[in-house]
Image (cartoon, grey):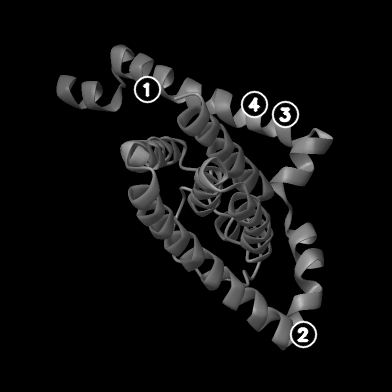
Amino acid sequence: MTSARCRGRANPEIQSIRLSLALPSRRRVQLRDLWLQTPLGYHVRMTSEQYQRWTAGLRVRPRLLHALLALNSAFRYLGYLMYALLLVLVAAFNTPELPQYVLVPFVSFVVLSIVRRIIDEPRPYEQLDIDPLIRKGTRGKSMPSRHIFSMFMIAMGWLAFWPPMGWTLLVIGVLLAVIRVLGGVHFPRDVMVGALCGIIAGLLGFWAW
């Protein structure tokens, strides 16, 4: 009888531990709710109605939708290609700086990936009642956007090596950010933070080094 009562009664110490673990999560939810009530938070977060309104024109124009999906893939592969080309050119014309052009993006990418996994924000298609234009099976890890971070990071590297290409890639990065939001795989906030992280990491790594 005593053991049954003990099983039915929660241990006060265990309850205290569970409560202490739950409080940070509750505070984060409360702060997020307050942020979403602000005008800026409303727009960078995106709602189902906003998404449907933004993508309505694409859904009735198959050619535009196809172009958007094609650019999404093309821009991502372009980023990888341009980074490889950057390393080749730095190795050929400015060899002493090659370790910098390898380590800065690599370390920044790893740190951002760890932070993103810890934050583990859900994707728009997980939270909202939407039919995303870009099909993706990833769960969580929405913020910051790693694709946008990578594109802006590569653009910053090119800015330091040859500015005309750097500015071109920054423009492509902005277009890719818009595509990722319209595709329904990221909130506006995700791509904004990803771009900002890429710019800051690039400034610190290529100019403040």
Q: Label 1, secondary structure: give it.
A: helix
Q: Earlier in the sequence, mark 1 or mark 3?
A: 1
Which of labels 1 and 4 is toward the front? 4
Quadrant assignment, res 194: top right
Please name the residue that numbered disc 1 is placed on: 18
Q: Earlier in the sequence, mark 2 or mark 3?
A: 3
Q: Amino acid at mark 3?
A: Leu
Left or right: residue 179 versus residue 24 is right
Q: Between 124 and 17, which is closer to the camera in this rendering?
A: 124
Q: Amino acid at mark 2?
A: Arg
Return the mark for residue 31.
Answer: 4
Q: Position of residue 163 (x, y in %)?
A: 61, 47
Q: Are marks 3 and 4 in contact (CB under 8 Å)?
A: yes
Q: Earlier in the sequence, mark 4 or mark 2?
A: 4
Image quadrant for the N terminus? top left
Q: Residue at x 63, y 72 (%)?
A: 133
Q: State whether residue 135 is above or below residue 97.
A: below
Q: Amino acid at mark 1?
A: Arg
Which of labels 4 and 2 is toward the front? 2
Please name the residue that numbered disc 3 is placed on: 34
Please name the residue that numbered disc 2 is placed on: 61
Q: Are marks 2 and 1 in contact (CB under 8 Å)?
A: no
Q: Label 2, secondary structure: give it.
A: loop
Which of labels 2 and 3 is toward the front? 2
Q: Residue at x 47, y 36 (%)?
A: 119
